[in-house]
Amino acid sequence: MIRNVQSFALETEQPSPESSALEQFYSPEQIAQMWNLSVDTVRRLFEQESGVLAIERPRVYGKRRYRTLRIPESVARRVYHRLSLKGRPTC
């Protein structure tokens, strides 16, 4: 199920390790659709982000890399919050 952008409230909650395996995970395609961004932009945003599951097979000479990203909801919230604060004036 794809949620609206509004479901990513500007919170900075950190899930416990026990609950992180059970939280909602999103593909880059789902985040791209929710945030109205390209899939490539979402991949660049989350590629080095802590907490993102990156599943890839070993690179074979002459073949391209295959990588699957799964983004936990808590990480998506954290990035959304960080990006929404950029460009805002500080008092």
Image (cartoon, rainbow, N blue to C red):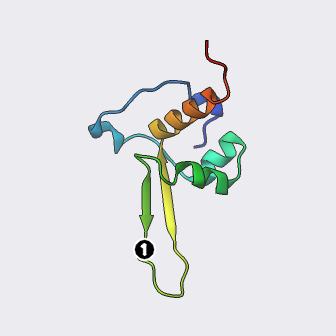
Q: Residue at x 53, y 87 (%)?
A: 62
As drawn, the residue found furthest toward the bottom would be 62
Which part of the image, by quadrant, shows the C terminus?
Answer: top right
Q: Residue at x 49, y 48 (%)?
A: 71
Left or right: where 68 falls relative to 17: right
Which part of the image, by quadrant, shows the N terminus?
Answer: top right
Q: Residue at x 65, y 57 (%)?
A: 40
As drawn, the residue found furthest toward the front would be 91
Q: Is residue 47 above or below residue 50?
A: below
Q: Quick one: 23 or 43, which is closer to the camera?
A: 43
Residue corresponding to mark 1: 57
Residue 76: x percent and y percent? 52, 39
User: Residue 87 falls in which quadrant of the image?
Assistant: top right
Q: Is residue 32 above or below residue 17?
A: below
- Crowding around mark 1 (Cα neighbors within 10 Å: few <14, some 14 to 19, many 20+) is few
Residue 30: x percent and y percent? 61, 48
Left or right: where 32 falls relative to 56: right
